[in-house]
Image (cartoon, rainbow, N blue to C red):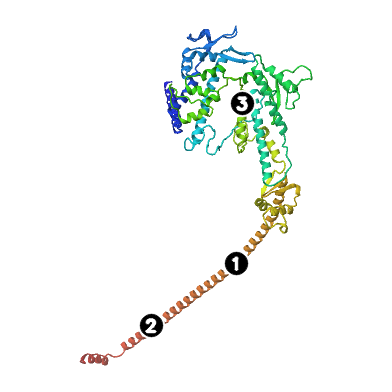
Amino acid sequence: GSAALEGAEAMGLATRESACDAMTILGVSEADQDAILGAVAAVVLLGQLEFVPEAEAEAAEWSAGAGVGEAGHERFAPRRAADVATAAAALCVDPGELASALCTRLVSAADGTFTVLLDAAQCVSARDALAKALYAAVFGYVVRMCNQVLGTAGGEAGDAATGSLDRSTGLFIGILDIFGFESFARNSFEQLCINYANEKLQRLFVQAIFIEAQKQYADQGIKVETVDFPGAAGAAKTIELLESKPAGVLPLLAEECILRNGSDDALLQKLLKEHAGNPQFRDAAAKRPGAKSGGATPPGPSGFVVKHFAKDVEYTIEGFLAKNKDPLNQNVASLMVKSKKPFVAALFAPPEEAQTKAPPAAGGGKVTRSASFQRSMRRGAGGGATNSKYGGVADQFSRSLDSLMKTVEASDVAFVRCFRPNGSQTPKVFEEALVRSQLSSSGLVHAIQLARSAYPDVMDFPSFFGRYSVVADAAKQPKGRDKKAAQALATALQLSSASFAVGHSKIFFKAGILAELNGRRTKAVQRSAKVIQRTARGLMARRLRARMQNAAAERAKAEAAERERLRLEQEARDREAAEAKLREEQEALLRRAQEQAEQAAAQRRATEGASPRGPKSESRVKSAATPQ
């Protein structure tokens, strides 16, 4: 609905603004930004073109005379003239020439150049090829521009045409993500190109390992015989089979494409004739069930088999010529070069012309371009362009591959091999057959075979002494840590002189020696571990016994102290009880004495009461009358 369209428009505007902001940060001028976005818009507009028989197309002033072709061929044209005009305006080319270029094709042959009419499917392919070429050229320009701006480090210093990211040193860091070796039930031209690239990269990979090993031997003063790594001769022959001139597979393919009456079958017959005795090449029909020498060819697609480093691959010859022919018509490329928009013309210009072109902005007139634009154009903005001379897809692929190989060979390379554990993209699932296939097709097994030739294992002296001194007898262990000491330790380990080599700072071992030493070391460590364990257990037992004895003594001492405390407490209680009893006895005696005294007093009173009163009364009266 309208809401979805509004959302898509808002997202598009936000994306455009973000891209423009990024280009502004990189120092791209507004004129360059408009040119880039205009070229991208042209790609979208080209996608709107539809092709129908000319009788069904809208009439336009360019309809008549759009080109002539062989009699009997139906002419096709764009359905809507307005779409052609809009796309042509975006590209700044003549609409009639654009329609003609998309509906016809110039074919170069040995007897000259002629024009053929395209059917609807071929017109669509020509349209798509132009859109892809334009987009690829713009993309390449943006990438080169970003590299130059990010690598300038201070402005305009350095040569803009050097192609290096760091112009002060010429150094750069690159990541090459290569496609893997391909072998399907049906393989065609695409698989041949991919496997051709893998052959060359695999050779580089193996040579890098081989050269690195040889360099290490030389640096350490180790003399080794020349090692012929496995499969090297076969790999070289396969590459020669594919690219050698004039009878290689790719050169013969290019030759057949030039011929007006060239065909896939003719190409196959030439290949079979030229490489009949080549062990890296054979007829695909030769190994099919029912094939007999000199007999009829068994049913099945025609093709050939190439012996690659990973496995033999059968290629179906059908479609080779069509796929190799450049999908971008020469007349379309020539029309783009004539564009009145300098940016588009520079994108499609041949390399030698692109180096000298510094076109003005897309508004006409002489306008000074930004330095980033001029540098990028001088570096070869002809990405996706075609030359007037015939060059097929395989030829372009070979040139790109050669350029890549020169760059990689001049670099300090490191390799990372990635493998897919399963085909279902499921975590923690390992499919052995799939991984084995990848190990084989990646050439890693080949590289391991190379690495294990000569002296595959190497250790520096400190690691060697630290790890394997325990294996030798203590009396035979050397005192130092130099080359002489390493030789002595190797001798003490009872290694034969042919199984190792001592360098200036490293020692090298033949295959299997380190595994043997590791096994002996494991046993020595186990023996030492038993001694250490026995000693440790005895020490811990003695310490435990001493602790137990000390604990018993402490316990006895504590028990004696507790008994003494209880005894003293009992004595105190007994003493208190005796004192309490004594006090009770004294109190009892005192009470009896008092009672006796009271009884005695009572008896006296009783006795006195029984005697006469006279004298006593007198004495009382007398005493009362006595003055004080």
What type is the residue that disc 3 sits on?
Phe
Task: From the viewer's side, name the closer residue of 46 and 526.
Answer: 46
Q: Is residue 581 left or right of residue 266?
A: left
Q: Of the residues tagged 2 and 1, which is closer to the observer?
A: 1
* The disc label shown at residue 397, or none: 3
Task: From the viewer's side, name the closer residue of 76 and 335.
Answer: 335
Q: Is residue 105 depicted above or below 315 in this figure?
A: above
Earlier-in-chain disc, 2 versus 1: 1
Are dots 1 and 3 in contact, CB under 8 Å?
no
Residue in the picture at 51% in, 14% down: 97
Q: Of the residues tagged 2 and 3, which is closer to the observer?
A: 3
Residue in the picture at 73% in, 39% down: 227
* The disc label shown at residue 594, or none: 2
How far across and down, in percent of the image, does residue 6 sit?
A: 42, 23
How far across and down, in percent of the image, does residue 627 sit?
A: 20, 92
Q: Is residue 578 left or right of residue 417?
A: left
Q: Secondary structure at mark 3?
A: helix
Q: Is residue 6 depicted above or below 567 in this figure?
A: above
Question: Label 3 neighbourhood size at 10 Å, few (<14), some (14-19), many (20+)?
Answer: some
Mark 2 vs mark 1, CA separation in Å = 65 Å
Q: Which residue is mark 1?
A: 550
What type is the residue that disc 2 sits on?
Gln
How far across and down, in percent of the image, does residue 274 sit?
A: 73, 22
Earlier-in-chain disc, 2 versus 3: 3
Q: Of the residues tagged 1 and 3, which is closer to the observer?
A: 3
